[in-house]
Image (tube, rainbow, N blue to C red):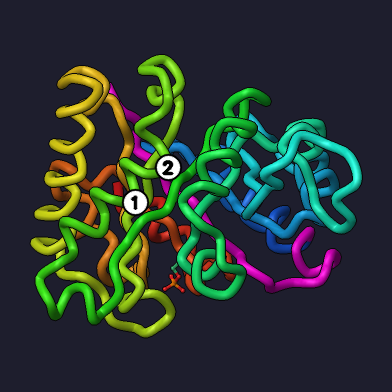
């Protein structure tokens, strides 16, 4: 069966000492606790190795927030999937709407990133989601279908079975506006049926689909109670142990 997963996305927050303190704090808070989900923290590149060394990575897995679309070589400033994997990170967030919007990442580029992440045994957390205009026009189902098809449907069934999807409606990110649990359930079920149409029911049922967008201690329980919501990708509320821990405990 698919796994429940709560992943933090720290985005471009925390200096290295601050990030280490946050990771260690979470590690301590989870020590001796039984939780009913896998826990991931998505940290800035320069934190990866130090954070992975400072925590119990069998309890909290580490994720990068991006990786390059090229294997290696003369690409100044880029960080490859192999480099990410060599730090001890196990996941990589790809296709976040902020990367699509501000850094012009296209479906084609994301397809390459996913392939390289999988080749390096990283689990991609692949983000999709519509804008407010899309939703107002009733296009949310078409938009997420297109995002999934364009970047992921070239993968083999075996490769597809190793990734996680995060549905993050752009209008809910950092806005304090959350999709209702019903809205999340409706589109998660739709995404799962799109996956099933290509890869079959078994792979679709095994794919974890996370919700992201202003998820917090107050709304997490209701969201993860929905049958097709397998966890969350959390931005702002992952930046303190106090806010993140109750979300982990929502399962
Ligand atoms: P917020 O939880 O801050 O809305 O961010 C969501 C997000 O973008 C996680 O990737």
Residue at x 31% of width, y 41% of height = 149
Residue at x 24% of width, y 22% of height = 199
Q: In the picture, residue 191 is in which quadrant? A: top left
- Residue 28 appears in the figure: no
Residue 68 locus on image (x, y percent)? 71, 47
- Residue 197 appears in the figure: yes
Magenta segment boundaries in residue numbering: 1-20
Residue at x 73% of width, y 59% of height = 44
1 and 2 marks in contact (CB < 8 Å): yes
Residue 82 locus on image (x, y percent)? 77, 32
246 in relation to 37, above or below: below
Near-viewer residue (53 or 242): 53
177 in relation to 231, above or below: below
The residues bearing labels 1 and 2 have C-alpha atoms spaced at a distance of 6 Å
Magenta region includes residue 6: yes
Q: In the picture, residue 55 is in which quadrant? A: top right
Residue that badge 2 annotates = 151
Residue 220 locus on image (x, y percent)? 29, 61
Residue that badge 1 annotates = 147
């Amino acid at each position: 069966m698919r796994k429940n997963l709560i992943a933090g996305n720290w985005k471009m927050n925390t200096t290295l000492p601050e990030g280490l303190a946050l990771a260690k704090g979470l590690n301590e808070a989870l020590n001796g606790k039984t939780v009913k989900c896998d826990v991931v923290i998505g940290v800035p590149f320069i934190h990866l190795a130090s954070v992975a060394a400072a925590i119990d990575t069998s309890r909290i897995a580490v994720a990068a927030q991006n990786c390059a679309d090229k294997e290696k070589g003369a690409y100044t400033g880029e960080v490859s999937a192999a480099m990410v994997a060599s730090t001890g990170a196990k996941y990589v967030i790809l296709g976040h709407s902020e990367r699509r919007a501000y850094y012009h990442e296209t479906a084609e580029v994301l397809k390459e990133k996913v392939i390289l992440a999988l080749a390096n045994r990283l689990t991609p957390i692949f983000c999709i989601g519509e804008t407010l205009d899309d939703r107002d026009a009733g296009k949310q189902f078409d938009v997420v279908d297109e995002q999934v098809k364009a970047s992921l449907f070239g993968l083999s069934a075996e490769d597809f079975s190793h990734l996680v999807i995060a549905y993050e409606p752009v209008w809910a990110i950092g806005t304090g506006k959350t999709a209702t649990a019903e809205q999340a359930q409706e589109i998660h079920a739709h995404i799962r049926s799109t996956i099933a149409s290509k890869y079959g029911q078994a792979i679709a049922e095994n794919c974890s689909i996370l919700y992201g967008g202003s998820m917090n201690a107050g709304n997490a329980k209701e969201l993860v109670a929905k049958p097709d919501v397998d966890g969350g990708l959390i931005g702002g509320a992952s930046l303190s142990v106090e806010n993140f821990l109750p979300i982990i405990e929502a399962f």
